[in-house]
Image: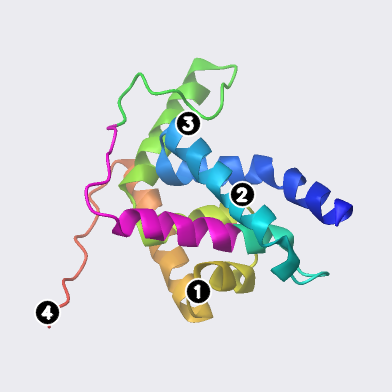
Amino acid sequence: MHDDGARLVACIPRLRRYARALLGERADADDLVQDTVARGWDRLATWRRGGDMRAWLFSIMHNLHVDRLRQPGLPTVPLDDDSPMPADPAQPSDRLAVRDLDAALQQLPPEQRAVLLLVAVEELSYEQTAATLGIPLGTVMSRLSRGRERLRLLMLGQPVPAPLKVIK
């Protein structure tokens, strides 16, 4: 149990990074991480030993995040140019690139942003990402492809095609 607790604590920096990129707001991200760690600790006995604890914790975080999105009247805080950046590069041009990337990530649809962050930033495999988000592997690949293309267009300042609307 002590080793499992140490593994859980070792995942906190990656959880914080993912939550910050997912939510944009540091305080909200820290709240999500705290709730994730608390739930993970309470349910540590349900974690399959030998499995990837990081992916398990990301699943918990994803479910908590989705639950919060479903709650009516969630308070939001708009991001502006004064918002703190996740990194502090040495060169001013690097800071601008990070700011532009952060702004472009926030413009992605949440489902594409989540997949892109898990695969590109957190280095989860497609299978782990699918399990974390509870979606099929093909959906992970298509969301990743569309997210990368949309991010590329945003970073180049090119117009992004409007998504097709589903009519029921």
Q: Which residue is mark 4?
A: 167
Secondary structure under the numbered disc 2 in the rendered image: helix
Above or below for 165 versus 162: below
Q: Nearer the viewer, residue 7 or 88?
A: 7
Which badge, 2 or 4, comes first in the chain's sequence? 2
Asked if the residue under mark 3 is in contact with the one under mark 4, i.e. CB atoms within 8 Å, the reply is no
- From the viewer's perspective, is the residue at label 2 or at label 4 nearer? 2
Q: Residues within 10 Å of mark 2 (few under 14, many from 20)?
A: few
Secondary structure under the numbered disc 1 in the rendered image: loop
The magenta segment is: 58-78
Question: What residue is rendered at 67% in x and 40% in y?
Answer: 13
Separation (CA) of disc 4 from disc 3: 37 Å
Separation (CA) of disc 3 from disc 1: 30 Å
Separation (CA) of disc 2 from disc 1: 21 Å
Which badge, 3 or 1, comes first in the chain's sequence? 3
Q: Quadrant of the N terminus?
A: bottom right
| Picture quadrant where residue 132 is located | bottom right
Circle 4: residue type? Ile
Separation (CA) of disc 2 from disc 3: 31 Å
The tag on residue 32 is none
Percent across and percent down for residue 131 are 58, 73
The tag on residue 134 is 1
The tag on residue 38 is 2
Q: Can residue 121 be seen here?
A: no
Percent across and percent down for residue 153 are 33, 50
Question: What residue is rendered at 66% in x and 62% in y?
Answer: 43
Q: Quadrant of the C terminus?
A: bottom left
Instruction: State whether the magenta stretch is mostly helix, strand or loop.
Output: helix
Separation (CA) of disc 2 from disc 4: 40 Å
